[in-house]
Image (cartoon, helix red, strand yellow):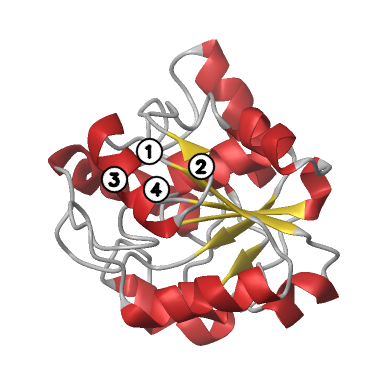
Amino acid sequence: SCSKPEGWGSLKGRFTRWGFAPTATPGFSPTAATRGRPGGCGGSSSWEALCKDKGMFRPKAVLPGLTHLTPGFLRARGLKGVILDLDNTLLPYESEEVPEGVLAWLQELKEAGIPVYLLSNARPCRFRRIQAALGLPGHAPAFKPWFGFRKAIRALGLNPGEVAVVGDQVFTDVLGGNLAGGYTVLVPPLADREFFYTRFIRLLEAPFRRLE
């Protein structure tokens, strides 16, 4: 399906600064300009196979921020658990201080009986400190997008379709979550500061966010 993900229409401006075209949706459009490069179809057979399945790079929903993922939003879609990215989704890159609004949101999910599992490519020592402070299950480095998601789903004790996979990157969170069968939710990054590799990847993500 080439339909727009939930919530995309009202977020065009918010996402433009992170590499989205003004009329973009998180989809895929192979063009002559990107053919043969990592940002489009072509190249290796494995990448080509992924390119052919456009849905793998498309989130099920796009939200203006993490706290918009409310218990009501989840229940309305039959979702019973959350797999949550760390850097620039839960807290700013390299920070260990979770914003107050996000802490309140986590408490809201807890009171609603919705479990949260942290899944990150972050350094394990930093990840463990954050995990301990929040009292949440999880593991890192997960080596997303290829690994980690199915383990997280098993840890939650839910079926893949009952789990929201939430993050700020297409090539890790959205791709990995879709490959595992989860309900993928894309949010904008919390801060501009990022790992240099992530800044590069955001440029490669742009072709997957344009309307066909």
Q: Are marks 3 and 2 in contact (CB under 8 Å)?
A: no
Q: Nearer the viewer, mark 1 or mark 4?
A: 4
Q: Residues within 10 Å of mark 4 (few under 14, many from 20)?
A: some
| Residue shown at 50% from the left, 30% from the top | 41
Q: Is residue 47 visible?
A: yes
SS type, badge 4: helix
State the image coordinates of residue 124 (x, y, percent, origin top left): 30, 31
Q: Earlier in the sequence, mark 2 or mark 4?
A: 2
User: In terms of image quadrants, where is residue 150?
Assistant: top right
| Residue shown at 66% from the left, 42% from the top | 178
Give the answer, above or below, for where 118 lies relative to 99: above
State the image coordinates of residue 52 (x, y, percent, origin top left): 65, 32
Q: Describe residue 29's horizontal placement relative to residue 17 as left or right.
A: right
Q: Earlier in the sequence, mark 3 or mark 2?
A: 2
Q: Earlier in the sequence, mark 3 or mark 1?
A: 1
Please name the residue that numbered disc 3 is placed on. Answer: 129
Q: Residue furthest bottom?
A: 10
Please name the residue that numbered disc 2 is placed on. Answer: 30
Please name the residue that numbered disc 4 is placed on. Answer: 131
Q: Are marks 4 and 3 in contact (CB under 8 Å)?
A: yes
Please name the residue that numbered disc 1 is placed on. Answer: 34
| Residue shown at 31% from the left, 59% from the top | 88
The kind of residue on which mark 3 rests is Arg
Q: Are marks 2 and 1 in contact (CB under 8 Å)?
A: yes
| Residue shown at 73% from the left, 33% from the top | 154
The kind of residue on which mark 4 rests is Gln
State the image coordinates of residue 193 (x, y, percent, origin top left): 14, 59
Viewer-proximal residue among 211 and 137:
137
Query: In whole angstroms, how far apart are the C-alphas of marks 3 and 1?
Result: 41 Å
Query: In whole angstroms, how far apart are the C-alphas of marks 4 and 3?
Result: 5 Å
